[in-house]
Amino acid sequence: MTSQRRYSIVTPTVLLTSSIAAIAIIIGALVSYPLIVASSQDVGQRNLSQLANVTANSLERGSGGRGLGSSLVSTLQRESISAYLFSPTAAPGTEFDDLPLGFSQELASALVSGEVVSERVETDDGQFLFEGRPLAIGGAVLLVQPVSVAGASASDLISRLLLSLAIGLVIAIPLGYMAARRLARPLRNASKAASVMAQGTRGVHVATEGPREISDIARALNSLDTALANSEGRQREFLLSVSHELRTPLTAVKGYGEALADGVMDGAGAQEAGAVIAREAQRLDRLVNDLLDLARLGAINFAVTPAVIDLAEFVDQVCEVWNYRCTESGVVFLCSSEVAGNFTVDPLRLRQIVDNLAENALRVTPLGGTISFTISMIHQSPDTRSITISIEDTGPGLTTDDLAVAFQPGALYERYRGVRPVGTGLGLALVQRLSQGLGGVAQAQVGRDTGACFIITIPEMNSAESDLADTPSREVH
């Protein structure tokens, strides 16, 4: 299929400005022409009137009225003016012969009667101007001039007007071109920026210049660039968080699987290892299903599914997995529990919180160090309960400034990268997000020894939420 040829905005803009200028010229000429003609004819009538006065005075003063001065005759001839002299003996009501075309007997009688005549008359041969003056010595003089001659200056004025308008049109075309280029420049910049953004480049800034509509486009592109950067940053954070979550159950499955393969465990130990592998595989399956759900939703939020769990069993599972992990790493894992019975919470999210805290503690705890896991129950009222989870390590610890930013994504990672063992910096941020999603809070404190202590308080979900155990009750953003 043949692609439609695209043209620049400059071309229609220049055509538009040129058309507007041409239309303005035509309208100006149409409006100005009759005004110029009328004004020129009025000027011609006034000039002829003045010449009539001069001629009358010349006849009255010169040689008893027998003739005109040579200069005056030359002027009359140059202006194509015809002079008619009415005899002093002519009486009113006389029928005059050889009157100029268009000059009636009535006008002639009025003139010889002593009236001043100033007329413009339309004839078959065109328009004529008449200026008649009675003479003090008797008789009268009449000057006749064609309007075409009297208004000859109008043609010159119109020609000059058309020339100036044409020059204006010639000037308007390059000015329109320059204005169109200036108008199109921010649009071209916006187009280039959009193309660069489409190729994956972020941090693109478009100058907000030009008219308001174009600057709005630039601001919209800048906002889009920021939104894309934030969105991609959230996606990267999410992917890193997912990999962080998958690492713990995979490590447990790998460790127990190798132990079984090497024959380190047999009998009851092998059965126990198989049970751990099955539980961790189930957790992996849940995480993978969450990923599929999130992909279908097109979001990066975590669904929360409440269920009734046995706290003692939950603690046993945590202690079993992390005791194995810590023993492999040469670290002592101490497990202390003061809870028993059932508790309504999302078990996967609760386990994610514990695993992230334990993973973070194991990473910074030196060989021979200790990680303490404690879980207790708080009764705010007979119907309101919360569990408090505490994980404390004997690692390098946190400063007061560190505590303020401990749960910010990547904050501790940026501070201690290359100084101490650090992960992606997302584990603690995920702990806070999940804690808030479960309605709880996450706190960071200085440990009793040299390390750090993280305390998570999670309230029990109510029975209404528990009834929705098979469906997501809310999402963690």
Image (tube, rainbow, N blue to C red):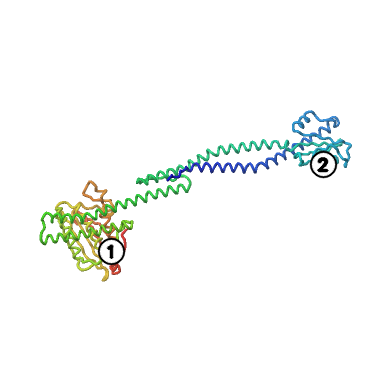
What amino acid does circle 2 point to? Ser
Q: Is residue 95 left or right of residue 380?
A: right
Q: Is residue 422 left or right of residue 155?
A: left
Residue under the point 88% across and 38% down: 90
First along the sequence among labels 1 and 2 = 2
Tags 1 and 2 touching, CB below 8 Å: no
Residue under the point 24% across and 61% down: 348
Q: Report the quarter where the C terminus lies.
A: bottom left
C-alpha span from label 1 to label 2: 114 Å
Q: Which residue carries the number 1 mark?
A: 305
Q: Position of residue 63 (x, y in %)?
A: 85, 29
Query: Which SS class for mark 2?
Result: loop
Q: Position of residue 360 (x, y in %)?
A: 22, 54
- Above or below — where is 398 with respect to 53? below
Q: Is residue 455 left or right of residue 327?
A: right
- Above or below — where is 218 with respect to 433? above
Q: How many marks?
A: 2
Query: What is the number of the mark on residue 104?
Result: 2
Residue closer to the observer: 471 or 39: 471
Q: Position of residue 431 (x, y in %)?
A: 26, 57
Residue closer to the observer: 110 or 444: 110
